[in-house]
Image (cartoon, rainbow, N blue to C red):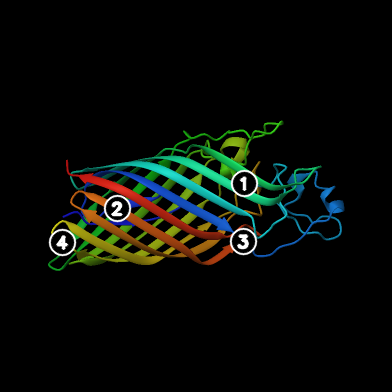
């Protein structure tokens, strides 16, 4: 009988079977953002001085107007923040996982991204425009990962410790241009790829007792400088999930789970300058369900933010959803 568990991480989207098996899977992931901590307006006189974006992260406009722009800073993109603004990041992800002799686990992840950003008022100087939508799609960066599997058995339970290491390769599309006359590149933060390496040491611990257990893990990601001289800030993730399995029929297994997920990231760098509208901390409550029939599993995960302290007046997390179809096999 195949038993499974899943969790979501911005560093590395993790899916692992409770029994060590190889598998092939297709995932859909959705991340949404809307609302801000505060709203302000900018007068036309203040808009006229928005000419040197690299200065905006640390100064106020004349008349004590607050700085209002989208991250990353310094790309001539200014936004008067509104309740109508939103961002969505959707991913179709193909994943292959191979387990060798119950001791080693190797994973490859290839994403295709659909990123959409909407602003009610977009200050494209000198002529502001309204109802502006930016849409970017393309291949994301390939991820390769390897884990060592260390299992400890006793009469009542099983402990599994999986230290590992993942690498994001600069294979995705990171220099997609907009369709306007100037044909500027889209923001690095909404490009499908980063044109940078990312290195992710991580460890997972799982305790399994009869038909229930706890799955915990943590990871740390640090990246090199990528396209447009932009470098993502280092980030840390940790999660703890409780799961319980129910045998519905001889072939159908249900495994609901619930827990907490936390991530913290440092400020991004643009031309080696910290970007004040990036980075911060957010905690999510998570619920999920695995629906398993023989060798096939449907995986569902939803995360809702319960606390977020972001740097500056960034757009806020609204929720995350993941749906996956996994076919596992034993070699």
The x and y percentages for residue 280 are 57, 59
Residue at x 46%, y 38% (from the top left corner):
141
Q: On the picture, is 154 further left or further right than 142?
A: left
Q: Which residue is mark 3?
A: 35
- Nearer the observer: mark 4 or 3; the answer is 4
Q: Of residues 329 and 73, which is closer to you in this image?
A: 329
Q: Earlier in the sequence, mark 1 or mark 3?
A: 3
Figure label count: 4
Position of 50 with respect to 289 (left or right) is: right
Observer-nearest residue: 28 or 95? 28
Asked whether the viewer can see residue 231, the reply is no
**Residue hosting label 1:** 269
The Cα–Cα distance between marks 1 and 3, rounded to whole angstroms, is 24 Å
Between disc 1 and disc 3, the foreground one is: 3
Mark 2 vs mark 3: which is more N-terminal? Answer: 3
Mark 2 element type: strand
Residue 106: where, in percent of width, then height? 29, 42
Residues at marks 2 and 3, CA–CA distance in whole angstroms? 32 Å
Distance, label 2 to label 4, CA atoms, is 16 Å
Q: Secondary structure at mark 4?
A: loop
Q: Which residue is mark 4?
A: 249
């Amino acid at each position: 009988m195949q038993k499974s568990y899943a969790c979501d991480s911005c560093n590395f989207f993790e899916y692992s079977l409770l029994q060590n098996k190889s598998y092939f899977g297709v995932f859909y992931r959705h991340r949404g953002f809307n609302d801000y901590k505060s709203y302000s307006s900018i007068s036309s006189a203040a808009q006229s001085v928005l000419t040197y974006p690299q200065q905006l992260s640390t100064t106020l406009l004349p008349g004590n107007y607050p700085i209002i722009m989208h991250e990353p800073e310094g790309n001539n993109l200014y936004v008067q923040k509104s309740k109508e603004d939103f961002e969505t990041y959707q991913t179709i992800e193909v994943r292959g996982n191979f387990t060798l002799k119950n001791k080693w686990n190797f994973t490859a992840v290839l994403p295709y991204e659909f990123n959409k950003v909407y602003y009610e008022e977009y200050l494209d100087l000198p002529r502001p425009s309204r109802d502006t939508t930016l849409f970017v799609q393309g291949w994301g960066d390939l991820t390769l990962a390897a884990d060592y599997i260390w299992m400890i058995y006793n009469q009542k339970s099983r402990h599994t410790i999986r230290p590992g290491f993942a690498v994001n390769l600069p294979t995705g599309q990171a220099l997609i241009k907009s369709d306007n006359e100037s044909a500027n590149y889209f923001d690095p933060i909404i490009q499908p790829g980063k044109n940078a390496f990312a290195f992710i040491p991580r460890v997972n611990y799982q305790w399994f007792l009869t038909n229930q257990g706890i799955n915990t893990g943590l990871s740390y990601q640090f990246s090199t400088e990528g396209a447009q001289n932009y470098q993502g800030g280092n980030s840390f993730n940790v999660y703890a999930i409780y799961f319980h399995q129910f045998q519905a029929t001889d072939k159908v297994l249900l495994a609901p789970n619930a827990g907490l997920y936390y991530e913290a990231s440092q400020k991004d760098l643009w031309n080696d300058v910290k970007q004040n509208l990036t980075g911060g901390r957010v905690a999510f409550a998570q619920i999920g369900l695995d629906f398993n029939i023989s060798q096939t599993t449907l995986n569902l995960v939803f995360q809702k933010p319960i606390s977020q302290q972001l740097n500056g007046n960034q757009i806020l997390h609204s929720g995350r959803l993941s749906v996956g179809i996994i076919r596992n096999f034993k070699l």
